[in-house]
Structure formats: C-alpha cells, structure tokens
Amino acid sequence: MRKPRDIDSELKALEAKAKTLKERRVRQLGELVIATGADALDAEMLTGALLGAVTTKDGQTKEGWRKAGASFFLRTVRRSASGSACSAGDAPPHDGGAASA
C-alpha cells in the first residue's frame, strides 16, 4: 500500500510559491517603471497612461507601443552586454501613439 499524499503541506508549498511569484512580478514591474523613467511621473498620470493602454482598441497604436517596448528591451540587453548601464534618458519619448495613428 502506498503512502497517502499530504495535501495540506502540498497546498501550503504551492501557496508559498504563488506568493513568491507574485512578489517577483510586483518587483519586476517596479523595476520596469524605473528603467523607463516613468517613475518621474506622478501616480495619477502614470495610472491614466496605463489605463489608456489597457482600454485602447486601436491595433496600430498597440503595435507601435509593442515595437517601442521591444526595441527598449533590445537596447537594454545590448548596453548591459557592453558594460554600460541603460538610463531613463535612453528610452524613446512616449507620444501616446499619435505617430502611429
């Protein structure tokens, strides 16, 4: 006969792992805000910009934002590899998608 599983301890381990992953995600989002220079914005403006990004339906605008984000990460990786840090001033200006509309 095999040993019964300890469901309670497995559940506690999964809850601890979920908490760790959530904390890591929050920390990474904070690092992203700082890396892009968005920490210079007040909370209301940053919240408004994020809400605008979430609610926008224009595919061209979203694709422009996605491309800008991808190029930001590529520049960051290249600079990290070359030994120089990426500063917030290196991020492209955010035009709210006006250029791609």
Image (cartoon, helix red, strand yellow):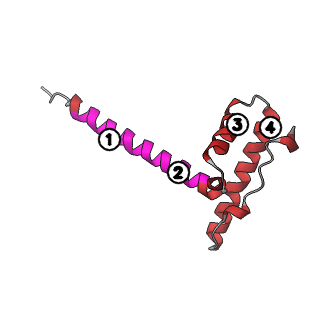
Which callout, 1 or 2, points at the residue further toward the start of the chain?
Answer: 1
The percent coordinates of residue 48 (x first, y second) are 67, 38
Which callout, 2 or 4, points at the residue further toward the start of the chain?
Answer: 2
Amino acid type of the residue that numbered disc 3 sits on in the rendered structure: Ala
How far is disc 1 from disc 2 in space, using C-alphas? 18 Å
Locate the N terminus by quadrant: top left
Amino acid type of the residue that numbered disc 1 sits on in the rendered structure: Ala
**Do the residues under discs 1 and 2 have CB atoms within 8 angstroms?**
no
Q: Is residue 57 left or right of residue 37?
A: right
SS under mark 4: helix
How far is disc 2 from disc 3 in space, using C-alphas? 19 Å
**Do the residues under discs 3 and 4 have CB atoms within 8 angstroms?**
no
Q: Nearer the viewer, residue 41 or 5?
A: 41
Farthest residue to the left: give it. 1
Mark 1 = which residue? 16
Amino acid type of the residue that numbered disc 2 sits on in the rendered structure: Gln
The percent coordinates of residue 62 (x first, y second) are 76, 37
SS under mark 3: helix
Q: Any mark on residue 61, and which?
A: 4
Mark 3 = which residue? 53
Q: Which residues are magenta?
A: 9-33
Which callout, 1 or 4, points at the residue further toward the start of the chain?
Answer: 1
Q: Residue at x 67, y 33 (%)?
A: 54
Locate the C terminus by quadrant: top right
SS under mark 2: helix
Which callout, 2 or 3, points at the residue further toward the start of the chain?
Answer: 2
Closer mark to the observer between disc 2 and disc 3: 3
Q: Is 31 inside the magenta-drawn segment?
A: yes
Amino acid type of the residue that numbered disc 4 sits on in the rendered structure: Thr
Mark 2 = which residue? 28
